[in-house]
Image (spheres, rainbow, N blue to C red):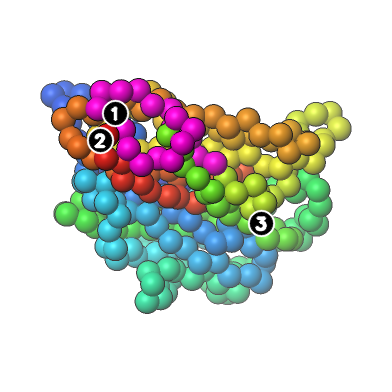
């Protein structure tokens, strides 16, 4: 899968003795994901950005997020050093908490691209990327995430999640101490065309990778993939959940990412059966 967007969150992890909690376990406030809609836009386009922020119990929170765009002409390794507020473009936030990234404002602030973008086609070429930094403080913990917004000759779409399944059924309950298979199924028609890695590339529907997080219990894997063949046959991966025995409910989050950095998420509350 070609990942054209990087989502890197600096989060607080709770400790059990001298061991850090696994990345799939929600034990402290987390900035789990940042989504851009669309994830790839045109040089004159605009993008809406939203963030998935959860508290220590895994519940989504509406804590205010500050947003800023960085120059696309310089490598950004450290958001504070390489994209300081004085060197960035602050983004306005609407009443619903979404930030707006306007590419005309990016060009006015940081300059025009030095070469034309490649034309669209069945096998899209590389894109320009505009780094965006999201910052939120919740329960005294400062969380930072980076999202790269792609720029190309034609926009690309974000995936949508059709269903989250537990043992091939609805994800609505668990057996305490039991083992379950969890999967996320995309809405097929929201996936853009990509290409195989054959010597002569063949157009194929892009795949997705879904990262899973739980507030209790444990996951044997961090993520699962869904891939497609040229005839639209899908292989849907899953992760193994070991359900807790000490609580009667848990929160489950699925964060789905496609090959262009398109992001979707969905949460479920599972109760003990």
Q: Which residues are magenta?
A: 167-185
In three-dimensional space, the C-alpha distance between marks 1 and 2, rounded to whole angstroms, equals 6 Å
Using the image, tell me which numbered label, if any, was put on residue 175.
Answer: 1
- Residue 241's place in the image compared with 29, above or below, is above
Task: Name the quarter where the N terminus is drawn.
Answer: top right
Closer to the camera, 3 or 74? 3
- Of residues 112 and 167, the one nearer the viewer is 167
In front of the other: 65 or 208: 208
Q: Does 135 appear above or below 48?
A: above
Residue 114 placement, left or right of 81: right
Q: Which residue is mark 3?
A: 156
Q: Which quadrant is the C terminus positioned in?
A: top left
* Position of residue 200 in the picture relative to residue 212 (left or right): right
Dot 1 lies on which element? loop
Identify the mark nearer the N-term, 3 or 2.
3
Whole-percent x and y of residue 240?
Answer: 40, 25
Q: Residue at x 31, y 45 (%)?
A: 269
Q: Which mark is residue 272?
A: 2
Dot 1 surroundings within 10 Å: few (below 14), some, or many (20 or more)? some
- Residue 27 to residue 106: above or below: above
Q: Earlier in the sequence, mark 1 or mark 3?
A: 3
Do the CB atoms of the residues marked 1 and 2 lie less than 8 Å apart? yes
Q: Are marks 1 and 3 in contact (CB under 8 Å)?
A: no
């Amino acid at each position: 899968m070609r990942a054209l967007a990087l989502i890197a969150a600096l989060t607080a992890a709770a400790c059990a003795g001298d061991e850090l909690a696994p990345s799939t376990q929600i034990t402290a406030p987390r900035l789990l994901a940042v989504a851009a809609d669309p994830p790839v836009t045109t040089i004159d386009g605009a993008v809406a950005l939203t963030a998935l922020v959860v508290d220590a119990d895994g519940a989504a929170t509406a804590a205010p997020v500050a947003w800023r765009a960085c120059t696309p002409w310089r490598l950004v390794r450290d958001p504070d050093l390489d994209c300081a507020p004085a060197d960035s473009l602050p983004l306005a936030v609407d009443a619903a908490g979404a930030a707006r990234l306007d590419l005309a404002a990016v060009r006015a602030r940081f300059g025009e691209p030095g070469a034309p973008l490649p034309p669209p086609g069945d096998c899209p070429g590389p894109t320009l990327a505009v780094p965006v930094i999201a910052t939120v403080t919740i329960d005294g913990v400062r969380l930072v995430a980076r999202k790269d917004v792609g720029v190309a000759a034609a926009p690309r779409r974000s995936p949508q999640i059709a269903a989250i399944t537990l043992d091939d059924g609805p994800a609505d309950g668990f057996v305490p101490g039991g083992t379950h298979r969890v999967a996320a199924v995309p809405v097929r028609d929201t996936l853009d065309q990509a290409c195989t890695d054959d010597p002569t590339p063949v157009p194929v529907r892009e795949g997705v990778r879904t990262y899973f997080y739980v507030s209790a219990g444990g996951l044997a894997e961090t993520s699962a993939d869904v891939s497609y063949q040229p005839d639209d046959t899908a292989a849907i991966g899953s992760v193994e959940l070991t359900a807790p025995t000490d609580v009667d409910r848990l929160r489950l989050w699925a964060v789905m990412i496609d090959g262009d950095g398109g992001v979707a998420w969905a949460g479920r509350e599972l109760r003990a059966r």
